[in-house]
Structure formats: C-alpha cells, structure tokens
Image (cartoon, rainbow, N blue to C red):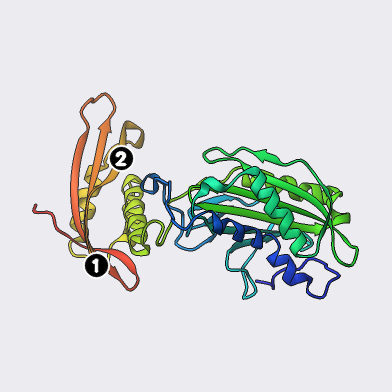
Amino acid sequence: MSEAPTVKNPKSDGKSLLWKLGLVVLAVFFTFGCKSKSKWNEKNLPLPPGADSGLYDGQFVQTDYGFGFPLPSKWLYVRLSAEQEVDEVARFSDADHEMIARISVQVMGDPAGFSKKSWQDASEQDLENHQFKVRKKEPVQEWKTADAGPWIEVPYRVMDARGEEWADEEWALNKGDILIGAHVLMPGDAAGTDKGKKFIKSLQGALTQIHWYMPIGPRGISIDRFELQHFTEDFCRALESRSTAKMGAYFDDMYPDRSKWNEWYQKAVAGEPGSFELKASLSGLVINGDDATATFTLTRLDKGDSHPKKSDRSFKLSKKEGSWKIMYSVDKS
C-alpha cells in the first residue's frame, strides 16, 4: 500500500492540520456527560463479514463500532498510519490524492446534548482555533439514513493564514452513545469543479447508506465468539449446499467416520434439487474455552408434503491451530 495521500497545503504544517481538522470538534462533546450508556440493542444486529475493519465486497466495515457503508467507485481506501488521530478510523481519497475524506468516531456521554446548532457552533470554533477565517457558510443540511438519525452537514468556504482558500465540509451522525464524523478538506479551486462536486456527491451517497452490525470487542461480541459464530453460520450454509465437497473444510483432517458421515448426508439430501427445500440451523451450542459442542438441525421439506423432516447432528468443535474445526461426532446413534 502506498503512503497516505496529502492535500496540497501552502502551510508547512498543513498535512498535520489536515489530519487534525474536525477531530478537535468532537472533543467538545466530551462535556456532554461522563456516563456511557448505549441505546443499541446489539444482540439483534447481524455480524460483520470479518474480524478486522476494512473493505469487504465493495464496502468499508468498521468492526469495533459496528457500522459499514459502500465505498464509492474510484475512491481509494488508505490504510491508517502512525500520524493518524486517536479518533480516526478510516481515510479515503480520490484517485489523484487531491481530496481526502476522514472518518472518525467519538464515544459520547449523554447524547442529548448533540444538536444541529451545537455541531455548527463547534465546527466554526474549531476552524477559528486552527486560524481559518470563515468566508462563507452554506445552510446546514440534513441527510436521512435508513435506520439511524440524519447526517448533519456543515459546508464552509474558509481562508487560511496565508490567504489561500479552502472548501471544508463537516458531517456528523449521532447514534446511541457514539458520534461518527466525516471530514473533508479540499483546495478552494477544486471544490467548484465537476471532480470536486462528484467527490462530495459520492460522499453523500455513501454515508446515507450507512448500515449497522454487531460490534466486535468491548461494545459487542468477543473475538472468540465472533469467530465461532461465523464458523457455525458458514457450516449451516455448507449443509444447505447439498455438496459434501463444500463441507470438507469444516472437518478436521483426523475426523473419524468421515465415510459414515458422507453416507448419511448424501442420503439426507438425495433427490432432484428442485423437489425439496433444505434449511440448516444451529439449535444448540455449549462453549468451554477453546472447545465447544454444537448441534445442527437439518430440515427438509419435500414438495407436496406438509410435514418437514428434521434431523439433528451434534459435534465436538475445537479451535485448532487458530481456527475452529469439527473434531468428532457426539451423537448417541
């Protein structure tokens, strides 16, 4: 991965200012309260697609706080470097590295103190603190999301201490006890171009499609439980595939009675694929450190039959060499 992109800044400390701009704004909200009380019903959220934050199938996923949004086409995902701010969780740029969008997250106390006016006031104060003069500010806008409150967007035209003009946009979304910020700074002459307008339009399109996952870590599920849950969900999908070959990766190489299992499964899924429906689910799970006992239910419903046939199979699972595997069957039969 190439080094982090920079915005052309006439100030000697401009690059540092770019990364810091907007993050100081979030510190204002520390004063809203000291008790952290999440409003999320986390147990009902789906799991993210990976244990680490990053890009998955064209979307950026932040696993620690449990959100994701699609990455606009032609945007570059820039891995964070040592110069990142403590609250920065992602950074993106256009293909030419001229325009940069940074995503930050602040854990708030009492979110009741957040409002459109408070965000605008804090943004303007932060610009003044960084020796920017506000030359023009557009009306504050709100952008709806599907399952959270609206994004609040505050666009500015500002001038730095050397008289150079910049376009700055500050976005904020409050959900539960976290405040997500999106911060964009670009040269003033770029903001009015088609390229600059498309960058902001892409940002709007991505952020308004934000969606939520169960966080991994202290705010949600442990990494061990996350890995095990992914393993059991993936094994259910393999069971539904009607292919013994797709299930091979889930069994340990030393799994006994592999031929017996294959014979049972082939019999359970015998017939024309379109003649019956097949559904697999995890119906029981007991965890004991790096070992677990899991029971899976395979349900088959043949066309013309109103009574589904269910079969349960229980296995001993173990985290072997860093990944979960099915070690042996614990069925009585």
Q: Position of residue 92 (x, y in %)?
A: 67, 60
Q: Which residue is mark 1?
A: 289
Q: Residue at horizontal 56%, vertical 52%?
A: 179
Q: Mark 2 Cα within 10 Å, few/some/many (few <14, many 20+)?
A: some
Among the 4 quarters of the image, the one containing residue 140: top right
Q: Residue at horizontal 31%, vertical 48%?
A: 239
Answer with left or right where residue 157 lies relative to residue 309.
right
Helix, strand or loop for disc 1: loop
The reply to whether callout 2 and callout 1 are in contact (CB within 8 Å) is no
Is residue 55 shown to the viewer in this render? no
Answer with left or right where residue 273 lies relative to residue 168.
left
Tag count in the figure?
A: 2
Q: Amino acid at mark 2?
A: Lys
Point out the residue furthest to the right here: 163
What label sits on residue 164 in the rendered view?
none
Q: Nearer the viewer, residue 302 or 86?
A: 86
Helix, strand or loop for disc 2: strand
Q: Residue at horizontal 32%, vertical 49%?
A: 236
Look at the picture and state if 22 lies above or below 209.
below
Mark 2 vs mark 1, CA separation in Å: 29 Å
Q: Position of residue 170 (x, y in %)?
A: 70, 52
Q: Position of residue 192 (x, y in %)?
A: 86, 49
Q: Mark 1 Cα within 10 Å, few/some/many (few <14, many 20+)?
A: few
Point out the residue furthest to the left here: 332
Q: Which residue is mark 2?
A: 279
Look at the picture and state if 55 lies above or below 308.
below
